[in-house]
Structure formats: C-alpha cells, structure tokens
Amino acid sequence: MDKRILLLHPADNVYVVCQSLGGNEWLVTADGDMLVPDAVAVGHKIARNAIVGGQPIIKYGVPIGSALRDVARGEHVHLHNMRSDYIASHARGGKRALAATASHH
Amino acid sequence: MKGWLRQDGRKGIRNVIVVAYLVECAHHVARLIVDQSGSANVHLIGFPGCYPNDYAYRIMRAVCTHPNVGGAVLLSLGCEGFNREELADAIRGSGRPVETLVIQEHGGTRSTIARGVDAVARLQQSLAQQPRTGIALTELVIGTVCGGSDGTSGLSGNPAAGRAFDRLVEEGAACIFEETGELIGCEDVMATRAATPELADELKASVEKAARYYEVLGYGSFAPGNAEGGLTTQEEKSMGAYCKSGDSRISGLLKPGDQPPRGGLYLLDVVPDGEPLFGFPNISDNAEIVELIACGAHITLFTTGRGSVVGSAISPVIKICANPETYRKLSEDMDINAGRILAGEATPAQVGDEIYRLVLAVASGAPTVSEQLGHREFILTYKQFEPIGPACLPVTVKG
C-alpha cells in the first residue's frame, strides 16, 4: 500500500494521511488505485470506499461520526461532509441536551 | 527477569531508597541528603502541603511501600499536618527499613542533612543484602500515559502502545490506562469492553464525572487546533488517546492508590470526586505517573508527539515518540521511535512488539533513557476521592 496513507483498523472506511498529498494524486491501495482529488494534510482522513450519506465514518474500528452526504472513494473526509454523533452522556435527557446538540452541529 | 520479593508478595524490578519530604519546608534538606548520598539509587519524593490530605497520605504510603522501593527516609519539619508517625509505621509494617528525621528536633539544616546521609548509608547496607528472586511477567504492573500530544499521537505512538498492552495483558500482566478526561466521547465504545454490565456503568460514570469536572473548570476538550490537525469530532479525538488501551477486555476500574488484584486491563479514574476543589485533576504529566506508580506500576509507557523529556522517581518511564520530526530533534530523550509508522517503515504491531521487548529488558534491569539521564521527577498535590464501588473490581473476572 502507498506509504503516504495509513489504515488504522481493518474495519475502517477511512485512511489517515501520514505524508501530505498535493491534489490529483493516484495512490496504490489493497483495493486498487485510488484518486485523491484534493490536497490533504497530514493527520486528515480520506474515504477508503464510497460512503452513503448518514452512514457511520469508521476509524480505529469504531464510529467517530457520520457522513452528511454521499462521499466518494478517495474524497477528503472532514467538517464539510461528516459530523459528530456524540452527545455528552451527562447531558443526555437533561436540560442541556438540546443546547449541547444544537451547538455541536 | 530478577526482582526483589517484598513482604506483601509483590516483587520490585528496582530497589530504590526514597527520601521523602512531608512538607515543602523540609524539601531543601531532603534534596541535599539525596545529592550528598551520591547514588542514582536514592530518589527524592515529597508532598509540599502543610495541611493534611487523605489522598496525599494514601499516595505517599502507596509509593513508599511500592515494590520498587527497598527503604525510606522521611523528612519532617516538625509542625506540618502530615501524619509522619502513621506513615513510618505503615512502611515499617511492610517489612521495609525506615528512618524519620524531624528538623525542629535535630538541630536544623546541617545536622539533619548529616543524620540523613548516615541514615541513607545504613539503608544502602541493608538493601545490599537483600537477595534477588525470579519475577514473572504475570507479576508486573504496567501503566500508560500520554503527554505533549499532537496529531501524530493517535496515529503511531498510541496504537503501538495499545498493541504492546494487548500482548502484555494476554500474557498475564496487569496494565493500567488513565485520564478519563481524554476519553470523553468514547465512553460507550469503552463500556462494551467491560467484563460485566455493572463495570460498564462504572466506566461510563467515570467519564461523565470527568466531563462535568472539565466543564466547571471551563475547559472543553475539542479545540479549533484539533480540526486543523485533521480531527473532525470529539469522539475521534478521544479515540486517539483511548487506543493506548489496546483491545483487551477491561477487568476493572481503579482510583489512585488501588492495586489491580490480578492480571488484566484496568482504567484508572484520576478525576477527583465531589465538587472541583483543588483545581485541575492532574497539574502535569508526572502527577499522573505518580498515581500509576501508587497503583503499583513497575514501568510507565509514556507516548508523546511534541516531545516530553521526563522520567520518574521509583518506576522507570519508557518514552515512545509518535512524531518522526520530534524524534529527529529529541532522539536523545526517546526510547522508541514510533514515528517510523508514519514513514511507512513499521506497523503499529511491529512497534508494539518492540515496546513489549523493551518492557521485558527494563524489568530485567536495563535502564531507560530517562533513567540514564537522571530524570526522577515526582509531584504530589491535594486531591479528594471516594473509595471505588463494589462493581469496579468484579470478582468473577478471570485473569
């Protein structure tokens, strides 16, 4: 696999960029070549496969949020196309739950 | 591996003498005793506060009777609130030689230093006669912390530490991870790994407590800089810290000073109970390391991205550098270069195996880099805790 990306867990649907990508670059992956259209910095995520809007984004083998819309394989995954699903446990059902959810998204 | 057998059945991988000041007023005298002893085996520890605190007493007792400690010299000014008699009794009761020096009764700075140097020499003689005995991996307690984290910590250093933890737990060691404030957002994921449903509730409650505590202090966990580094959500950020724990089942929840009853993986709840009273849960990385040592940790795995240089009194620290750029700058302070994972030169599993092998070597007596450099940091401050509940250490769990 291309050394510029890292698969943290076999169940992940995102790769993590570990050497920055300049845009319009082809990477070799276990699932065949993948085009990354955007410039992507170290530490950022790109989709390992096509992700349907509303589906969870899996990193470290667990959901870290969900896709806001359909995401293509090789696309940069960040604030513009995914969001958190986390609501602080101590706020769930409490007075702050609504406010926390509203401000979070 | 060879170690020192203590009266309570635990074994040490080091045999150090601690010189402990029981109030800041005795710090200088204690430090000069350590300096004049001229031995790397004599470690300075202490508690600066004048007012008594149950937590500080409990931690001091736990570290003075840690298996890596062979004997203790206690330094008291004389009028501080710390219960020096009870501490000395506890150390003596653990089968260790202990001497208490009270500056107000011994004629001041010079006389007390002279007495202290003599006391250390007597303890050294007594320690030299202690035989070493075989020590198994199943008798080791290993802790992990992260400090000076950056975007690489969750990609290389922490996953590698997690792989090492998996292997250590599988082979019967007790492993402890901590900092519940950095687990906010992955409490539900973590709870699924609990040995029992009741423990799962305790794990979740400990993270909720941390979230409330940090909220009162006015510190949110997810900062704009995190997004620039590629982190998108709270749960993603926390997973980066959480992955130090590996994938093993979680056998229990400890609070500072509690000992893991058997092998397995444990979460250490470091956030104080009750209303926030004494400020930040832990004021620096070494405060966390001291709490791990108070739980019996023989060795601490310390992952860093931006680059820490610290070690610790009593128990060796293995520093794991996540960031290849930091490693280039600070290689003289690092034991493990996990940044090779980002360069595509190694996998987390390979670096995890490297950490595992280093743990065995350090447990066999090989000095870590921070030990060689003379790092023996120690910090203990005011905190408050309630005892853990009965669900925190399920008795049905098999090691």
Image (cartoon, helix red, strand yellow):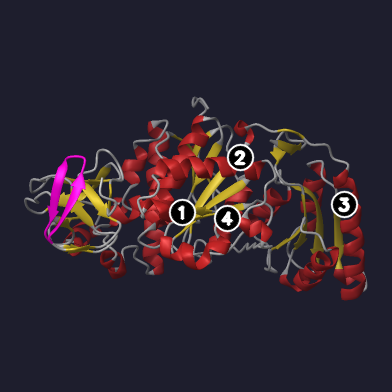
Name the image quarter holding the N terminus of chain B. Answer: top right
Task: Find the distance from the CA under tag 4 to the CA under tag 2.
Answer: 19 Å
Q: Given the image, on which type of amino acid does mark 3 rest?
A: Leu
Residue stretch in magenta: A24-37
Q: Which mark is residue B123?
A: 3
The answer, for residue A91, to whether it is visible in the render is no
Residue located beneath label 2 in the image = B360
Q: Residue at x 63, y 63 (%)?
A: B379
Q: Do the residues under discs 1 and 3 have CB atoms within 8 angstroms?
A: no
Q: Residue B289 carries which label?
A: 4
Q: Residue A71 carries which label?
A: none
Query: Which callout, 4 or 1, points to the residue nearer the camera?
Result: 4
Q: Do the residues under discs 3 and 4 have CB atoms within 8 angstroms?
A: no
Q: Which residue is drawn at 21% across and 48% down?
A: A14
Q: Mark 1 lies on which chain?
A: B
Note whether B95 is above or below A95 in the view shown.
above
Q: Given the image, on which type of amino acid does mark 1 rest?
A: Glu
Image location (x, y in percent) of residue B285: 53, 61
Residue placed most toward the observer, A46 or B49 = A46
Note whether B323 is above or below B104 in the view shown.
above
Residue located beneath label 1 in the image = B179
Query: Which callout, 4 or 2, points to the residue nearer the camera?
Result: 2
| SS majority, magenta | strand
Mark 3 lies on a secondary structure that is helix
Query: Which callout, 1 or 3, points to the residue nearer the camera?
Result: 3
Mark 4 lies on a secondary structure that is helix
Query: Is B91 on the left-hand or right-hand side of B388?
Result: right
Task: Find the distance from the CA under tag 2 to the CA under tag 3.
Answer: 28 Å
Q: Which chain carries label 2?
A: B
Q: Mark 3 lies on which chain?
A: B
